[in-house]
Image: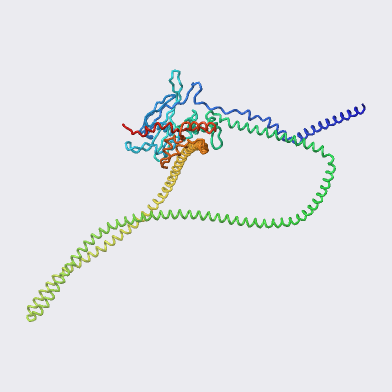
Amino acid sequence: MSETNVRDENQLQSDTEEENISNEALNKINEKCLVDDGAPEKHFYAVINDVTVLQKELPPAPEPPIKCDGTGPRLMIKEIWIENFKSYAGRHVIGPFHKSFTAIVGPNGSGKSNVIDSLLFVFGYRAQRIRSKKISVLIHNTAEHGHMRFCKVEVHFCLIVDRPDGGYDIVGDSEFVISRTAHRDGTSVYQIDNSVVRFSQVAERLQQYGIDLNHSRFLILQGEVELISLMKAKGDDNEPGMLEYLEDLIGSSRLKPCIQELQEKINEVQDVQCERVISILLVIGAFLLQTNLEPTKTEAIFYLRLQNEQIRIEHLKTQLKLIKQEQGLKLLIEKQEQLQAEHDEIKDAVEQHKQLALTSQHELDSLKKKRSAAVAAAENARNKFSQFEKNAEKAKKDLSTLRLEELKLKRETCLKTINDLDAGLPELKATQVELQENIKVKMESVQKDTAEMTTEINTLTSELQKLKPQENAITAKLKTAQNELLTLKSQHLAGEENIDEKNKVLDELLQSIKQEELKFERCEKQLNSMERDVTVKKDELNMLIAKEASLMADLRDMENKDQEMRMRFSQGTNQNKIVQALMSEKRSGKFKGFYGRLGDLGGIDQKYDVAISTACPQLDSFVTDTMVTATECVDFLKMSNLGRATFIALDKIRDCADAIKRPFTA
């Protein structure tokens, strides 16, 4: 009985000690968390108590283009004005349209599709989406109406309010017009109420009424329904899916940033909680490890003391080495400082030389520019001076020509007189010679008769005396003409001196004219340069605006093409899976009456491939021998969950063979 009491007392004491140890451990853990990890503790509560993300307001939902109950204003296309667009020559008005539903009917080639193309044209679609190679092809061009330079489409919008009687009322001041004009050079201009704008402004204006031109969710063209139905349930970074498509339509995509912020907040709280749990576990582990390693604590302390002593000795040795190395290092530092100083001096000298070289180079460039300007100015002045010299020379020549003509007239008159006298002088001399010969003859012939001879001599002498006055008169006239010629020469020299004085005055006037022309040329050059700058800036602005519109249109076209190609690829992949599965079953002997895809059973020239593939969608159908085989293939596709396919049973179309062979009779 006593042993039991002692055992109970020992057990009670042991339990009490264990409880005290547990309480002590918990207190130490709490102290450890609060003291050592005070900063993480504050960070933990700061993250937990941060509710700014929860207090943020959600982005407002976009205003719907029309209310669910049908009340309130909504946007309506009132009419379309088309000018020289595709098959429409001149200006045409299409409309007014119905407020809810409009159908465009007519025979083939009547221009039904051109109405939709005109809307696509205004909404910024590329020419390829409007069934044209380029924008300029959209301009009407026929021999009847000649060569048109532009095409223009105007879409008239207005806000309406439906009435209970089926009519509607137009909201005041709500009408506006969006137009697009294309030219032969491939450029196009957007306008809102006759004001030139960018395509982005057109998109913003229509976005206010729920028309999204960037994603084209408001417009479903032919063939796009099938592409939308073949979308994946959820898209990825490269391809949008049905979920993203519906989110854009509903407007819930605006909540994605808020959801992302909330997810980041959740991740942050989870990270902080994990860090706190890990820190608590580490403290608990450290405490348990400390209580279990108490027996080896003394040995570890003794070992650490020995290790510290050894490290202290090694440290003293290292300090001794450092002292020796510091002494050598000081010498090296002094030498390095000396070399650095020399290096700095050399560097400064090099910098000075560089500065001098740069200054000299700048001065040389400046002198070269001045020299070039001076050479150009001198060349210009030389050319103008040459022109003025030519003008002055011409004036001199004209003046000299007038004076010389006058002198020539006088000289010619004198020369004519002299020539006349000279012409008579030889005749007289000839007469004199003839007379002298006659005298000799007569002297010889009349020697016998002295009296007769003397008489004749006297007669001849008297005749000679009569001719002497004529000779003297001719000599006097010659001297008079020579004096007049000298007078004319002196007048010519005086005229030349007068011309030189006039030339000096003319040169002074030319110098002043040159200075004024230089000033005028400087002003004209400055004006031309400013005009060119303004023209260049305007051209650059117009080019940038046109380039922005073209790039935006290219971007939208590429996005649409990318989506279309992805849909076609997905459709082709699904078709290939069906073909491979059915052909595999045929090879296994199950579907012996399955012949394959209709388009693979025949061949056609490559140049007709696109046309036939577009006009004959039945080429994707599969051919079987009987309706039973076709039914088995359909059941197989349903069981394998491979999709849907169209089958052509030959036994069902054999009834038409006779009709095909029968000749046509009108």
Estimate the x, y position of residue 283 in percent, counting from the top left. 76, 36
Q: Residue at x 42, y 38 (%)?
A: 612
Q: Residue at x 39, y 50 (%)?
A: 513
Residue toward you, 326 or 104 = 104
Q: Quadrant of the N terminus?
A: top right
In the image, 583: left or right of 329?
Answer: left
Residue toward you, 538 or 594 = 594
Residue toward you, 492 or 631 = 631
Residue toward you, 403 or 206 = 206
Estimate the x, y position of residue 556 in percent, counting from the top left. 48, 36
Query: Residue 260 sits in which quadrant?
Result: top right
In the image, 408: left or right of 349?
Answer: left
Q: Is residue 273 visible?
A: yes
Q: Residue at x 51, y 22 (%)?
A: 68
Q: Is residue 494 above or below residue 174?
A: below
In the image, 483: left or right of 662?
Answer: left
In the image, 490: left or right of 232?
Answer: left
